Image (cartoon, rainbow, N blue to C red):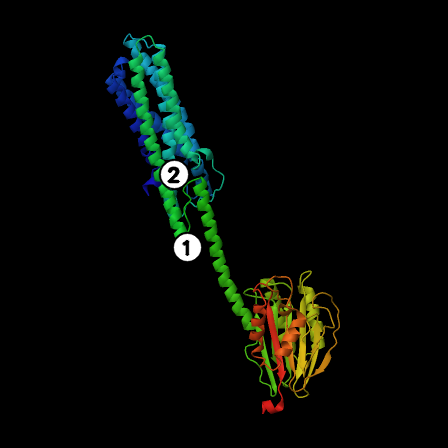
Amino acid sequence: MAILQHPMIRFSLYLWPLLLVFSLGQAMMHWTGNSGLLHISPLLTLLDMVVFVLSFGTAAWFSSRPLSLCLQKSQLPNYARRVETLMANFPKRVLKIFLITGIAFAIYLLLAIIISSLIGSAPLSPVLMISLALNFCFGSCILAPALAVANAIVFSVNLRIDLFSQGLFQGDLNGGYALHKFTSSSYRPWLVFFVTGLIPVLILSAYVYLALNDDQGNKHFLLMQALVLLLMSVSGSMLLVWTISRTLRCVTDELDSGLRKLAAGQFDLHVPVMMDDELGNLARGLNTAMRGLREREDLKDSLMIASEIQQGLLPKDTPQIPCYDLHGFQKTCFSVGGDYYDYIELDDGRIWLVIADVSGKGYPAALTMANLQAMLRGLATSNWPIEEAATYLNSALCDTLTAGRFVTLFMAKLQPESSSLVWINAGHVPPLLLSAGDIEPLLASAPPLGLVKGLNFEVTRSELAAGDTLFCYTDGVTESTSRLGQKHFGEARLRQWLLEHKDMDITELPEALLDRLNDDGRSDQDDDLTLLSVHHQKRENYE
């Protein structure tokens, strides 16, 4: 774009308000007759205009030159960072250069009038010198730099938009800009008041004082100079307010567009940071929010895939065993979790039943669970004795788990021909064996896996009579909290609930229990919840 190709020329064109105010001041001097009293000829007026254009045009060139040179070197390392730094400090550079230029131009005007008056044989009185000095200092040293900085901000906003559209500017420089008090939106109205309100009023007060104490007939000249000052002040104020409001409208429109896109869920977009003030910080915050939401969306997709993978590790088909019903159920508090259940059918008709709980939640627990599942499947298909399998698992987990992490495990081998169950409980909450009117907990006889190396595990044998049900669960059941968060559901209440529902089909037990826990105030963030049930049917029911 043209603004990128010729930034020095474009910035000079942005300074037309300075030329307008200066021209109005010159015209007012001629209209009031003060130019004639000072012997300012049309030729000198034209010369003043040429000097003004050359002086402030050169100031614009020097102000924008580093930025222009940087824009032409897009292949330099850290190019975007260099551009952002120059853009952030551009208003300060403009203020400094235009202030120096304004002082020099005010001195030139005073010298030109003094020389012109001497040539015309009409030396200026001290009162006239003071009034002219006040007007020249206000116009050149205060109003001109203020207008220059205001239009430098407009130029900077448009340049940032062009750079942003080409992917060369992001505006990530936060807090590294200079002249914050001038560019800050909260200070800007006060600066406009200071430049176009307070200072002109103080100068007018000085004119009134000079006029009241004048005895040389300069009252008319002083009043006309007050009109010149008033015209410059009003026109400068209007231009500053128009420039600032136009800039703020452009910035707020971009922010409004960004908020609409955010509300619509378009998180892949980026809002251009066009100003280094509170609005710029708001744009940076909006972009940070968009990046965070985009990352969250990406994470949700990853979690969804991870959840699908973990669900794929659980058994897909329930073994069909004469006189036995098996059913598993799992509900994680996050997308993935550390609970695990499995039933692995062996070639001889026996079934490995496994339920485990990895300490912790989320990804770390899920990774350990996947590792545990892979090892268990390999050991089961090799037909290892479950006590030797437990020893191997413990040794492997001690080598892989970090300090403080562990796995509780209940592992059993169901032998349908003998209606028996041989099992090991390594630190797991005790499964409950429901027989006629009674419940027997299968208590742990060893610590959890992954804590102590070199443990030996002994199996226990239990008989499964017709009508018995083995109910295995993780601590997400008993440690589910009430609404007030003051107590857990507990094993005693679980036993009572199971006795009340001992005749319910085991495929319906999980949902019924979950409803009971929800009625009690269970939170989805409590813990993972996993159930594994085995029911030995009565023969008449099976037949």
Q: Left or right: 470 with respect to 336?
A: right
Along the viewing direction, whichever of 276 and 126 lies nearer the viewer: 126
Asked if residue 353 shows in the view, the reply is no
The image quadrant that residue 224 belongs to is top left
264 or 153: nearer the eye? 264
Per the image, label 2 sits on a secondary structure element best described as helix
The quarter of the picture where residue 263 lies is bottom left
Which of the two discs, 1 and 2, labels the residue nearer the N terminus? 2
Locate residue 400 relative to residue 311 in the image: left or right: right
The label shown at residue 25 is none
Q: Is residue 28 above or below residue 327?
A: above
As drawn, 44 above or below 459: above
Query: Going 40% across and 40% down the picture, which residue do you hit?
Result: 71
Image quadrant where residue 50 sits: top left
Per the image, the residue denoted by label 2 is 156
Give residue 278's position: percent from left, percent from top. Answer: 45, 41
Question: Which residue matches tag 1?
Answer: 263
44 shown above or below 259: above
Left or right, 450 with reference to 283: right
Marks 1 and 2 close (CB-CB < 8 Å): no
Q: How many marks?
A: 2
Category of crowding for the residue at label 2, using alpha-carbon neighbours closer than 10 angstroms: few (below 14), some (14–19), many (at least 20): many
Q: Residue at x 69, y 77 (%)?
A: 386
In terms of secondary structure, where does tag 1 sit?
helix
Other residues around mark 1 within 10 Å, as few (<14) / some (14–19) / many (≥20): few
Kind of residue indicated by mark 1: Ala
